[in-house]
Amino acid sequence: MAPAGDGAVCETDDVDWLLNDLWALITVVGVLLVAGVGAIIGLVRGGTRRRRIDAGTRPDLTGVSGGDAHGSTATGGVDTLERSDVLTEPSAPSVETPESTRSRLRRLRSRLARSDSALSRGLLSLLQGGQLDEDTWDDVESTLLAADLGVEASASLVARLKERVAAEGVRDAATMRGWLLEDLYTELQPQMDRRIASSRVGGRPAVVMVVGVNGTGKTTTIGKLARVLVAEDRDVMLGAADTFRAAAADQLETWGARVGVPTVRSDRDGADPASVAYQAVREANEAEADVVLLDTAGRLHNKTDLMNELAKVKRVVEKQSPIDEVLLVLDATTGQNGMRQAEVFSEVVEVTGIVLTKLDGTAKGGIVVAVQKALGVPVKLVGLGEGPDDLAPFDPKAFAEALLGS
């Protein structure tokens, strides 16, 4: 029996040894699994943190090595990085503060005062000559025509000046310039209402439609006008109804974003401009905005189909709201060609005001007189430069003085 008993003991010892080894193996595997899971979690957390830092703004670690706000010393470890990551937010785009209207007017007068126009130089030379015969008067009228005052206004100014010279018997150049200045100021019709519709009307926003031919700076003018209105504490919305020119909506949206003004636009090029304009007015009404400015595609005034499309935009918008203002943007350098543009646009969409751009000098500024006389509508705004705040209300007195010089 002894051999059998010894064998049983040996078998039991073998089983115990195997069980001990198995438990040891299980323990090692368990430790490795726990360590592996922890490592994986750490990697995931670290990867997420890096993506957030790379995709947004990197955390500000200034002063981390010296201690955080609570006085604890840190060396830029994981805890500090995680805390900075959570607290760091992407910086919002800065919103500009547009120049005030009063400041714009001062700058307008200053620029016009420095203007050295061909008209002022030519008139000064003629009036100082001392020989006021018919040829001289013809030259004075030709000088006025060259400044685009138009035939009717030029003839009228010369006729009145001749009468006063004859009646007063005065040929002093300064006196004659003063008389001419008075008459020119009258021709600019200072009594005209040059205010822009920009306040709510009967519980709805004012609707301003901006039109013009290609290349006059129409979209830029709308962006600058938005700045004028924001400076006057108006709640403005823009409508990008120029859906044909590449990047026109992007350009308008950029102008608006600079002063915190939203833009309603289509997601695709070539969308129906009337539909976009209609939606812009609707959203402006829902947002209780003070005014909505509608950009339209530039078009040649002699293209019937394009002008009919412009009329359609106006009709569609008027199904939900009256249009309070139609501003025609004219390039001051186009001279009398601008007159024909103004006449056609006025026939199609009933222009209520003129914006005269590129009036960096006054050599061709007489177009102001001609267009107001022909259409019976005022020049309301003038652009005097490339800066974002270089659009100002039209000042007849300052303009007349600049046109004739000192």
Image: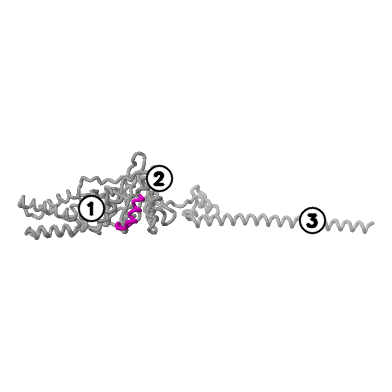
Disc 1 to disc 3, how far (Cα)?
107 Å
Q: Tag 2's secondary structure?
A: helix
Q: Position of residue 189 (x, y in %)?
A: 20, 48
The residue nearer to you, when weighing 236 against 278, is 278
Q: Quadrant of residue 6?
A: bottom right
Three-letter residue code for mark 2: Arg
Disc 1 to disc 2, how far (Cα)?
33 Å
Query: In this figure, which residue is indicated by the disc labeled 3?
Result: 19
Left or right of residue 175, residue 386 in this image: right
Tell me if mark 2 has few (under 14), some (14-19) or many (20+) residues whose alpha carbon lies within 10 angstroms of its own.
Answer: some
Is 203 colored magenta in this rendering?
Answer: no
Three-letter residue code for mark 1: Val
Q: Which residues are magenta?
A: 299-313
The residue nearer to you, when weighing 274 against 4, is 274
- Sequence-first tag of 1 and 3: 3
Q: Main secondary structure of the magenta part?
A: helix
Q: Position of residue 141 (x, y in %)?
A: 14, 57
What number is the disc on residue 282? 2
- Sequence-first tag of 3 and 2: 3
- Nearer to us: label 3 or label 2: 2
- Nearer to us: label 1 or label 3: 1
